[in-house]
């Protein structure tokens, strides 16, 4: 009798031992490491390149901004915040800042409105859709210098096409180069011509990703095209609009090509009528060879762009509502839902493993 019980216990112990997982060998660990580390290795070239050509120049510029830098000897004398104080106290800085914001507002706001409107038109069922979609991208493909040269001749004070048309209908010519506001309109027109199509295609791609079931349900409920646009299309474009607004802000505040090519000298006008921060930065660094002051101005521009970008982000989030989006939960609600899902999975696993443990204990007892 004792021998039978002993053999039964031995068999039960052997069965339990057979069900225990085997130790993971070096090959299995290597495979696990490969699964976890390979994605990071695949994307590492971008981050390494960004570290070399992106972060390092930014950090090096920050160091130079605190120095009176000598480009010939490649060394400098530490002066602290004197370069920043000199830049801010210069009246030219405030004129460049005013011009930059004026051109930025005259270009970005109409550009985004036109891009949304054109994208909504191209999203409709029209003929030759591919032709029109490719056509709006043609100005973006053109070289910025070519665009600036063409438009600078169009906005010429004496022999420009615009003033010729105005004279033909009896209106006085506009001094596109001597008048400050007129020059800003001309430069903003160049920017809008080149970048509207680019933003249009981004917004069009986002519109095409909106489920068509929303529009069909709205049509059944009696909503017209305008109502569908403001109730479905615009709320669903929220992430894309945030991206487009931030990139337009960065590009608008860094505008350089159009003001540089607007006249023959490229210095921002005789009275700094269209002098921008980037144009003045170029003149400080490579015109006056004052790299320390140019670096300080570059960091001031970086801080301005960062502040305006954050303001744009909050304004866009508040103005564009979540109606029509795919996920209406807030971030805290999404985190709570993920925690509840993980707890439910853990409870299911515990409930599934409980009968197994009971059977193993019964076998050992027998």
Image (tube, rainbow, N blue to C red):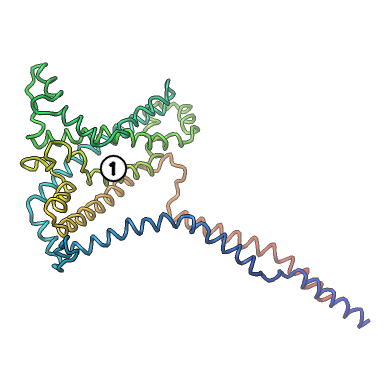
Element carrying mark 1: helix
Residue pushed farthest bottom? Answer: 2
Residue at x-position 27% and y-position 62%: 59
- Residue 88 at what x, y percent from top left? 11, 56
Residue at x-position 8% and y-position 57%: 89
Seen in the picture, residue 329 relative to 216 is either above or below; the reply is: below
Q: Nearer the viewer, residue 228 or 11?
A: 11
Answer with left or right where residue 48 lies relative to residue 24.
left
Q: Nearer the viewer, residue 148 or 112?
A: 148
Residue pushed farthest top? Answer: 169
Query: Residue 265 falls in which quadrant of the image?
Result: top left
Q: Nearer the viewer, residue 304 or 142?
A: 142
Answer with left or right where residue 363 lies relative to residue 269.
right
Residue at x-position 59% and y-position 63%: 32
Number of marks in the rendered image: 1
- Residue 176 at what x, y percent from top left? 11, 31
- Residue 10 at what x, y percent from top left? 84, 77
* Residue picked out by circle 1: 248
Callout 1: few (<14), some (14-19), or many (20+) C-alpha neighbours within 10 Å? many
Residue pushed farthest front? Answer: 72
Q: Nearer the viewer, residue 246 or 154?
A: 154
Image quadrant occupied by the N terminus? bottom right
Residue at x-position 64% and y-position 66%: 27
Residue pushed farthest right? Answer: 1
Query: Residue 123 falls in which quadrant of the image?
Result: top left
- Residue 273 at what x, y percent from top left? 9, 40
Seen in the picture, residue 26 relative to 203 is either above or below; the reply is: below
Image quadrant occupied by the C terminus? bottom right
């Amino acid at each position: 009798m004792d021998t039978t019980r002993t053999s039964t216990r031995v068999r039960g112990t052997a069965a339990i031992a057979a069900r225990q997982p085997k130790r993971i060998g070096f090959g299995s660990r290597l495979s696990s490491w490969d699964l976890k580390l390979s994605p990071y290795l695949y994307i590492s070239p971008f981050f390494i390149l960004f570290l070399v050509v992106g972060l390092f120049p930014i950090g090096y510029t920050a160091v130079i901004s605190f120095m009176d830098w000598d480009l010939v000897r490649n060394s400098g004398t530490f002066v602290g915040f004197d370069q920043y104080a000199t830049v801010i106290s210069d009246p030219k800085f405030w004129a460049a800042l005013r011009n930059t914001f004026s051109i930025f507002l005259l270009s970005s706001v109409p550009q985004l409105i036109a891009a949304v409107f054109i994208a909504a038109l191209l999203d409709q069922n029209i003929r030759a859709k591919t032709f029109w979609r490719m056509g709006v991208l043609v100005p973006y493909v053109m070289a910025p210098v070519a665009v600036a040269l063409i438009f600078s001749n169009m906005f010429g004070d004496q022999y420009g096409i615009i003033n010729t048309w105005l004279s033909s209908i009896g209106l006085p010519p506009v001094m596109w180069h001597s008048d400050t506001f007129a020059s800003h309109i001309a430069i903003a027109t160049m920017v809008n011509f080149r970048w509207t199509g680019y933003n249009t295609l981004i917004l069009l791609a986002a519109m095409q990703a909106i489920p068509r079931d929303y529009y069909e349900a709205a049509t059944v409920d009696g909503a017209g095209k305008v109502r569908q646009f403001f109730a479905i299309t615009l709320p669903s474009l929220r992430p894309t609009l945030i991206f487009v607004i931030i990139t337009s802000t960065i590009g608008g505040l860094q505008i350089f090509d159009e003001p540089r090519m607007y006249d023959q000298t490229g210095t921002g006008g005789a009275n700094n009528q269209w002098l921008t921060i980037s144009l003045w930065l170029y003149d400080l660094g490579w015109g006056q060879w004052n790299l320390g002051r140019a670096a300080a101005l570059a960091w001031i521009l970086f801080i301005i762009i960062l502040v305006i970008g954050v303001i744009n982000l909050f304004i866009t989030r508040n103005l564009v509502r979540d109606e029509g989006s795919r996920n209406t939960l807030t971030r805290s609600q999404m985190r709570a839902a993920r925690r509840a899902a993980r707890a439910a999975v853990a409870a299911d696993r515990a409930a599934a493993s409980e009968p197994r443990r009971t059977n193993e204990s019964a076998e050992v007892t027998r």
